[in-house]
Image (cartoon, rainbow, N blue to C red):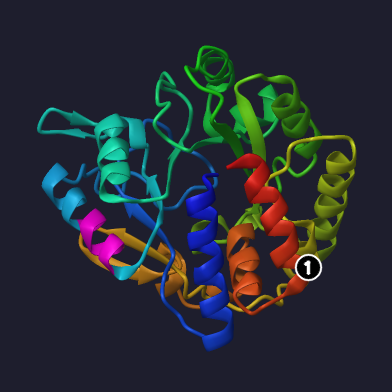
Amino acid sequence: MKLSSFIYFAKFGIKTILLQKKDPILGTIILTDKCNLKCKHCSVNNIQSVIYPYEQIRKEMKQLYQMGVRILFFCGGETFLWQDSGKRLRDLVTEAKRMGYLIVNVVTNGTFPLDLPQADLILLSLDGNRRLHNQIRGDTYDTIMKNVRNATSDNICFYMAVNQINKNAIRDVCRTAKRMRNVRAVSFNFHTPYPDTVKLALSRKEKARCCKTIVQMMKEGAPVFNLKSAFPYLIDQRFPTPCQQCVVMENGTLSVCGRCIDVPGLCEKCGYFFVAEYTLLFRGNIKIILEMLRTYLKYV
């Protein structure tokens, strides 16, 4: 991370904590809900299979920037399917950097070639070893591994949603991340139980066991991009939601925190690690602050 970016984020954090402000710093733009996969745990893809136009995306980028957002995520659907008016995903990342965004990340399922060195991080969904990943996402594991090996930059971060199917594969994903030269880190979430995927949710005991495994992998040198200080809050579901400093833009509609905020009762069952980490950070939790400093300086 550049020193100038670090100083900007530090000032934002201090102001937010001391003045209890709710201004956003992290924003996500949904480029499309179209996806080439039909994953068992996903409830937000291929609802309309719409690719949003370039000028609309650019307008949304400007709007979020004017709101104060400086960390931008492009999400889908599958982001690498996005194209419009001769523009592709690379053009959006470049345009976001030109606008002044300090960190620009992309979320992908990894089934397309990973030639995107302009992104700070490519968060690539990997949901276990070959058998379990393919059980969730179809026969894609080998394609993803090939794309990771052939990636043009080392900006890849594995992104694992832990659920009832893959809860015992955390070690596999950590060890894969550790040995692959183009993978910078691995980040975890617990499954957030949308109404049609409730059966995949973990119990408190299962979450505790998963967090214990993640901590053990950290001790073994796995490059985990999560904050263990937040684990007790995630296990007991006692972090504040929603995260006021995070927003999502989809098709001109702005939501606080995530697209799940309007689903009754779902916010209280949130499994997103970053929500716990950010809400605790901006409440002034000292352990979270110090650990986030170390983690972000290392991996971003």
Crowd rating for badge 1 (residues with CA inside 10 Å; few <14, some 14–19, many 20+): some
**Residue plotted at (74% across, 37% down):** 223
Q: At numbered mark 1, what does the secondary structure look like: helix, strand or loop? A: helix
Residue 24 in the image: above or below residue 299: below
Mark 1 lies on residue: 287
In the picture, measured across the screen, residue 267 lies left or right of residue 218, that is left
Towards the viewer: 23 or 47 = 23
Q: Residue furthest bottom?
A: 19
Question: Is residue 32 shown to the viewer in this render?
Answer: no
* Residue 118 painted magenta: no
Q: Quadrant of the N terminus?
A: top right
Q: Main secondary structure of the magenta part?
A: helix
In the picture, measured across the screen, residue 51 lies left or right of residue 9, that is left
Q: Which amino acid type is shown beneath numbered disc 1?
A: Lys
Towards the viewer: 226 or 79 = 226
* Residue 64 painted magenta: yes
Whole-percent x, y for residue 27 in the image: 39, 59
Q: How many marks?
A: 1
Towards the viewer: 261 or 99 = 99
In the picture, measured across the screen, residue 232 lies left or right of residue 30, that is right
Question: Is residue 259 shown to the viewer in this render?
Answer: yes
**Residue plotted at (29% across, 33% down):** 89
Span highlighted in magenta in the image: 60-66
**Residue plotted at (47% across, 33% down):** 109
Whole-percent x, y for residue 124 in the image: 53, 34
**Residue plotted at (52% across, 75% down):** 242
Q: Quadrant of residue 257?
A: bottom left
In the picture, measured across the screen, residue 204 lies left or right of residue 274, that is right
Residue 218 in the image: above or below residue 24: above
Whole-percent x, y for residue 167 in the image: 75, 44
Whole-percent x, y for residue 157 in the image: 59, 35
